Amino acid sequence: GAVVSQHPSWVICKSGTSVKIECRSLDFQATTMFWYRQFPKQSLMLMATSNEGSKATYEQGVEKDKFLINHASLTLSTLTVTSAHPEDSSFYICSARERDRVDPQHFGDGTRLSIL
Amino acid sequence: AQSVTQLGSHVSVSEGALVLLRCNYSSSVPPYLFWYVQYPNQGLQLLLKYTSAATLVKGINGFEAEFKKSETSFHLTKPSAHMSDAAEYFCAVSLTGANNLFFGTGTRLTVIP
């Protein structure tokens, strides 16, 4: 149980385009979803926390207009990297927390984004 | 404030040898502590968690960790390393149990045949 699916797993696109990454909880309802960014050989950096039906809370230094997060349902959150540039290239990982449970976050398999 | 420090960015052990990955935490209140494993190009998988119950926590794949308040440590161990254990391991702390995880910088485990 507690499976989180992230799609796509790998995306390459040209500079200036926008990229949408989906994060789905497959067998549970996720009231809270988290988006992380991981640079090569480094730890995870929390970008934002999103609660279903409300605006995401962004960490300090993360551009809200660059990284758009939508959490429209209890099983889906999306991260859109708008007008992506090479410096946005990274590994993005989502996680989800199950409703009404003191339970650890369950992580997706990540999306490797490469901007040319 | 809370944080974790993982001593040693790289650890190499021989197959069959003891695995010891170190994690020290800093927290103003009793923390929740976690160990996650990450295989290449994948997300994180929970190995085990400490939530103020038993101080010795057993996880998946034969791993266990012991919470030592006096040493502010939560080291991860496994009696006998397997080749499949080669991965990146992250220690994490949270004050609330699930939200606001703070990760250490990770330890890459290499298992030598």
Image: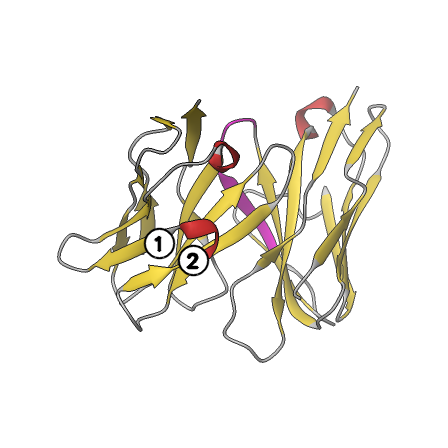
Disc 1 packing (10 Å; few <14; some 14–19; many ≥20): many
Return the residue at label 2: B59
**Residue that numbered label 1 is attached to:** B64
- Tell me the crowding category of disc 2: few under 14, some 14 to 19, or many 20 or more residues within 10 angstroms, Cα based: some
Q: Which amino acid does the dot numbered 1 rest on?
A: Glu
Q: Is residue B100 above or below residue B15?
A: below
Residue A13, position as x, y percentages in the image: 85, 27
Q: Name the residue at 30% across, 45% down.
A: B23
Image side of residue B98 versus residue A1, left or right: left
The residue that appears at 76% across and 67% down in the rendered structure is: A75
Question: Relative to residue A79, is residue B56 depicted above or below?
Answer: below
Near-viewer residue (B5 or A48): B5
**Chain letter for mark 2:** B
Towards the viewer: A26 or A73? A26
Q: Residue farthest to the left?
A: B70
User: Which chain is home to disc 1?
Assistant: B
Residue A72 in magenta stretch:
no
Do the residues marked 2 and 1 share a common chain? Answer: yes
Q: Which residues are magenta?
A: A40-48
Res A64 seen here: yes
Q: Are marks 2 and 1 in contact (CB under 8 Å)?
A: yes
Q: Is residue B46 above or below residue A38?
A: below
